Amino acid sequence: MSILRVREIEMGYTETGRGTAVALLHGFPFNRSMWSEQLEALKGSHRVIAPDLRGHGETTVTDDAGRRWKRWRATWRRCLMS
């Protein structure tokens, strides 16, 4: 479990394994914990990243969340996949 700060947002995520990166994105109203079994199954052959999306789990939300969603999503993808 890690925290990544992207601008004013703190994003919780889990990262494990090595190899080709795979991002697991949860749906509403869940958080990254829904992927625990998949993380275990994939970590032997892939780098697996499971973030908490804005306002879920350990990721914060700001008042202007709707406006910034597309830019924020692109930013965290670049950060996590690098």
Image: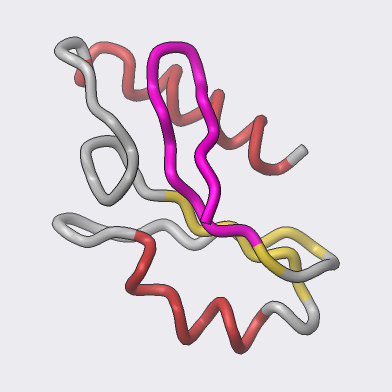
Badge count:
0
9 displayed left or right of 66: right
Percent x, y of residue 34: 33, 73
Above or below, comparing residue 38 to residue 58 in the picture: below
In the rendered structure, does residue 38 fall within the stretch colored magenta?
Answer: no
Taking the spot 70% from the left edge, 43% from the top edge, the residue there is 81
42 displayed left or right of 17: left
Above or below, comparing residue 21 to residue 79 in the picture: below
Taking the spot 82% from the left edge, 67% from the top edge, the residue there is 18
Above or below, comparing residue 22 to residue 45 in the picture: above
Q: Residue furthest right?
A: 19
Give the quarter of the image for residue 54.
Answer: top left
Taking the spot 77% from the left edge, 84% from the top edge, the residue there is 44
Q: How is the image coloured?
A: secondary structure
Percent x, y of residue 70: 39, 23
Percent x, y of residue 62: 22, 17
Give the quarter of the image for residue 27.
Answer: bottom left
Given residues 44 and 22, the one toward you in this image is: 44
Q: Quadrant of the C terminus?
A: top right
**Magenta-highlighted stretch: main secondary structure?**
strand
Percent x, y of residue 55: 22, 38
73 displayed left or right of 28: right
Above or below, comparing residue 28 to residue 3 in the picture: below
Taking the spot 70% from the left edge, 78% from the top edge, the residue there is 43
Which residues are drawn in magenta? 1-15
